[in-house]
Image (tube, coloured by chain):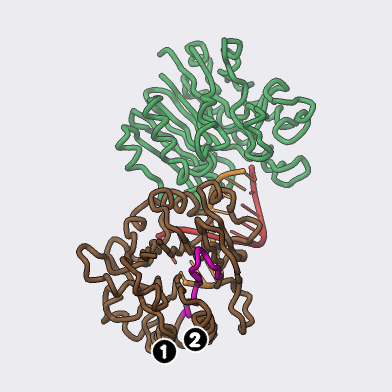
Chain colours: A green, B brown, C red, D orange
Amino acid sequence: MQIATWNVNSLNVRQEHVLAWLENNPVDVLALQETKLTDDRFPSAAFAEAGYYSVFTGQKTYNGVALLSRDAPTDVEFALPGLVDEHKRVIAATVAGVRVIGVYCPNGAALDSPKFDYKLDWFAALAEWVAAEAAVHDRLVLTGDFNVAPRPEDTHDPDKWEGRILCSPPERAALEKLLDTGLTDCWRLFEEREGRHRFTWWDYRNGGWARNAGLRIDHVLASPALASACRDCRAHVGERGRKRPSDHVPVVAEFEL
Amino acid sequence: MQIATWNVNSLNVRQEHVLAWLENNPVDVLALQETKLTDDRFPSAAFAEAGYYSVFTGQKTYNGVALLSRDAPTDVEFALPGLVDEHKRVIAATVAGVRVIGVYCPNGAALDSPKFDYKLDWFAALAEWVAAEAAVHDRLVLTGDFNVAPRPEDTHDPDKWEGRILCSPPERAALEKLLDTGLTDCWRLFEEREGRHRFTWWDYRNGGWARNAGLRIDHVLASPALASACRDCRAHVGERGRKRPSDHVPVVAEFEL
DNA sequence: GCGACAAGTG
DNA sequence: CACTTGTCGC
């Protein structure tokens, strides 16, 4: 079973990219972030034609998440319980016996911004909910754009990034707390393999991609039952080099189930 | 000698269309309208590589005209004398012994708009200047987007258009006054030929192109010496069906000189 | 509809 | 740099 995540930075713009990628990479589940469209505009027909169910929760301009799946999703939830939030950042569904939670975590803007406090509060609420979900679902995957690079080696330039937004101690602690609920960052199981890339996001600005000035901020976190069945986890870096790319690339994890 | 006109509705967007069209239609002179770019951004190098000189006068966002030519242009003028106007709507040059005046005439917006008065004043100033130029230049072509359909048959639906903007009596009188200086509307010499189309512009809105709901508002007007040498004049309607087309197509007149 | 801009996010 | 929503012109 393959489970993937991709922050598409507008599904309106990236719909054809996603369809083409799915054609070549017929994963079982694809979590999308930053769809940036309201539910009435979600292109479910196009995905259905490609053989995918879709569930989604979106808003105008900002945020928006979706889950595409080959098998029918059940027990769909569209928000974090226990957090009043206009932002559409969470979607969960059970697919083929696996609980999949797709998230678009807040960016945080800057350490001294109110948005940073919101980010930490949001992560706390997520951790609480994920712990409850993990208690119920043996097979659970939490995946999406976390807007946190967990370690110095997940940045292209630690001297530049350590302590800054996306790499600050409180954000890493918030991510760590998610892992503490028993989840494994699947990436780290395979990062030593040959020819592996290190990043999942490159800023559009300052030639980030050309300079390989990236970060690893998109993750697939798996419960113990799934982590032990994980056989690979990697970024499809080639997508960043296409025409009109998202600033993020797909991250795919494979499980032997 | 072939002389053409094309309102490109942003040369930034249409640069590749123009280069591709010139490759297949190596006309001697091409007058462009609505380039919508300032002179520092005019892509003269790209046109030079394609074998064309270019002279141009543009502004941000609106208007902007240019002349591309295989032979070097001389005696270039960049405005209508006798009319104070920020709008970049006129460019003239002598190419291979022919005086070419490229114009982007005001649209006029609506009959009761101040822009309509501006349009009529502008045409009056143009007529005065063209008469003076015609007195000096035996071989003269006045071409561009005139924003006037001269006759009912130059509209797809006279019942809808007669009397309205682009087809009102005062606008037609203003255009007539240009012809009265001794110019010939080259189109009318050949419009009965087989397979001719009737229009040069189709509104982007309401499926104008799909419905062939067009107007003939782009013209090539020639002095007597050239009119008698004119061998064809037609619209390259196919350009309207390409990807990301301008709402206008090229109009090409051929002269046996 | 499809250009142009401006302002806001990331 | 590349998205968004707006307004404007045609």
- Count of numbered badges drawn on the protein: 2
Question: Looking at numbered disc 1 in the image, what kind of residue is underneath it?
Answer: Pro
**Where does the image place residue B36, in percent across and percent down from the top left?**
56, 63
Task: Tell me, for residue A227, which label it has, or none.
Answer: none
Task: State yes or no: discs 2 and 1 in contact (Cβ < 8 Å).
Answer: yes
Q: Is residue B241 above or below residue A117?
A: below
Nearer to us in this view, A207 or A169 = A207
Residue at point 64%, 60% (across, down): B39
Q: Is residue A228 placed above or below C5 in the rendered structure? A: above
**Chain letter of disc 2 in the image:** B
Q: Which residue, given by chain and number where applicable, does mark 1 sit on?
A: B170
Q: The residue tagged with tag 1: helix, strand or loop?
A: helix
**Quarter-of-image position of residue A162:** top right
* First-in-chain label (2 vs 1): 2
Residue B41 locus on image (x, y percent): 63, 55
Secondary structure at numbered mark 2: helix
Q: Quadrant of the N terminus of chain A?
A: top left
| Mark linked to residue B120 | 2
Residue B64 in view: yes
